[in-house]
Amino acid sequence: MKNSNLQEISLLAILTALSVVFGLFIKIPTPTGFLTLLDAGIYFTAFYLGSKAAAIVGGLSGFLIDLIAGYPNWMFVSFLAHGSQGYFAGWTGKNNF
């Protein structure tokens, strides 16, 4: 018997972990600092799994990146910013396709 709730939680955990890895370890230098690939994981989740899943992945990955990188004062701001980014990306993607 398949437990779809467990599969969904596992998939979201894997996508969150991949987004954290993309955000922490892959940095693209720019003239004003650097660009990370955190958004790639959020947008991938938004377009394929919807707004709720993307909000969870975006919020948790932004929160964890700031916690691991040593910026605890920005954890909750990143949680809200990246969570809403994922939600609105999923909402926009769902309406267009």
Image (spheres, helix red, strand yellow):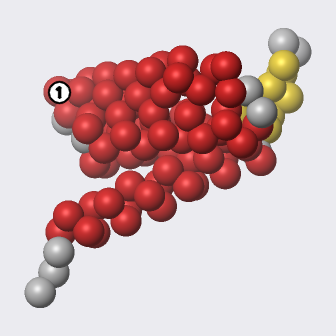
> Does residue 82 appear in the picture of this structure?
no
Identity of the residue drawn at 32% across and 22% down: 88
Q: Quadrant of residue 78?
A: top right
Using the rendered view, name the quadrant where residue 84 is placed. Answer: top left
Most distant residue in the top direction: 32
Compared across the picture, whether 72 is left or right of 11 comes to: right
Residue 75 horizontal side relative to residue 57, left or right: right
* Relative height, residue 18 to residue 36 (above, below): below
Q: In the depicted view, which residue is nearer to us: 89 or 78?
A: 78
Q: Which residue is mark 1?
A: 95
Quadrant of res 95: top left
In the rendered image, the vertical position of residue 49 relative to residue 83, given as above or below: below
Determine whether the residue tagged by mark 1 lies in a helix, strand or loop: helix
Q: Is residue 34 visible?
A: yes
Of 41 and 76, nearer the camera is 76
Please identify the residue farthest to the left as the structure is shown: 1
Q: Nearer the viewer, residue 12 or 50?
A: 12
- Crowd around label 1: few <14 · some 14–19 · many ≥20 (10 Å): few
Residue 53 at x, y percent in the picture: 31, 44
Q: Residue at x 20, y 33 (%)?
A: 94
| Percent coordinates x, y for residue 79 in the rendering | 49, 27
The answer to whether 92 appears left or right of 18 in the picture is: left
Q: Residue 3: percent from the left, percent from the top? A: 17, 75
The C terminus lies in quadrant: top left
Residue visible at 68% across and 27% down? 72
The type of residue carrying mark 1 is Asn
